[in-house]
Amino acid sequence: MTPDGAALAQDLGELVRIPSVTGRERPAMERFAQLAERRGLRAEVIVHDLAALRAHPDHPGEEAAREELVGAEAVLPGRDPGAPRLCLNGHLDVVDPGEARWSFDPWAGDVCDGRLRGRGAADMKGGVVAALHALARLRAEGVRPRGDVVLQAVASEEDGGLGTFAALERDDRFAAALIPEPTAFDVVCAQAGALTFAGEVPGVGAHAALRRQGISAIDRYVAIHAALHEHERRVNAGPGHPLMAELDLPYPVSVGRIEGGTWSSSVPDRLRFEGRVGIRVDDSPAGARAALEAAVRAACPEARLTWTGG
């Protein structure tokens, strides 16, 4: 490993070893700022006004519980304060490790067989640290861009993007943006949107011995699940944009959580499901919401959807 690679792995390992599950990102943001300052960049930890963001008419929604929203930024100053500025943006929050047993510590942050291991190493602490080292290298070599280059480290990406929303509410004076997500080094300039939803299916409770006197919320949901598959087929009937045609499934519709019933010997009178629907490049959030609501309503008129993020 080259000296530059070893330094990058060292910094990335420090960040990966911080379990910054969405909603608990402050320690990772503080460490990012320390790493930036260690590399000679100007850095700041930013505590956003969460109440104001939640009251904003364009609030993107939230899925994870949180009591604060913290971000950070590192800046490579430009020569001309009035010149166009470039934004680099990446998230430090990660999804929790899940319930399956890992073969190594999910927060290891170590290098094994030439790869750095741990939750968030690829998505996307690696990209954030790579961007940080790129700015540090330019500074070390005395390169000063015409305009500022601002690296935004954001929270809440995994549950809808509130961190980037907050960062751009604070400062959106950029001529262009680059997001170093893991894309196998392809430049991606067309991207599907996504909305998350929660649905509730009512039933009529009864003892299992009198099953026909009840209405199972689970049975009703089965029809909804089939309708979601059919809706996904319709949404993906055409790519909507030439750059999306390369993908096998540009606009997935998925259900990630189901909860129903309280006792094995009763007909369940309620089921809750949560999922995500892709938004076509040629559609709008409002259009995507209306189409999914219609599909669910046709399968089960009693079901109700709410929109949780996107």
Image (cartoon, helix red, strand yellow):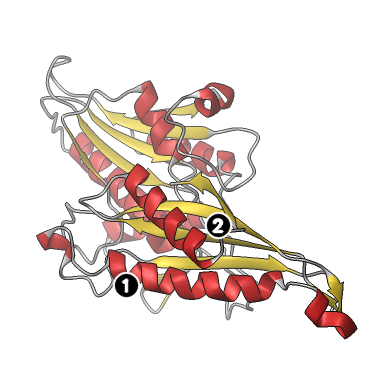
Mark 1 element type: helix
Which mark identifies residue 20? none
How far across and how far down the image is residue 139, in percent? 22, 34
Residue at figure coordinates x 49%, y 44% from the top left: 156
Tell me which corner region of the image, top left, top right, bottom left or bottom right, holds residue 144. Answer: top left
Residue 44 coordinates in the image, percent (x, y):
43, 27
For the residue labelled by badge 2, is the local secondary structure a helix, a strand or a loop? loop
Res. 120 in view: no
Query: In the rendered view of the protein, which quadrant contains the N terminus?
Result: bottom left
Residue closer to the observer: 238 or 127: 238
Q: Is residue 210 left or right of residue 98?
A: right
Front label number (2 vs 1) = 1
Residue under the image location 17 percent in, 15 percent down: 81
- CA gap, disc 2 to disc 1? 40 Å
Residue positioned most to the bottom: 209
Q: How many marks?
A: 2
Which circle marks residue 233 in the picture?
A: 1
Residue 17's label in the rendered image is: 2
Q: Foreground residue, 226 or 10?
A: 226
Where residue 217 sits in the image (x, y, percent)? Answer: 69, 69
Q: Residue at x 43, y 43 (%)?
A: 161
Three-letter amino acid code at the position of disc 2: Arg
Q: Nearer the viewer, residue 229 or 244?
A: 229
Q: Is residue 5 visible?
A: yes
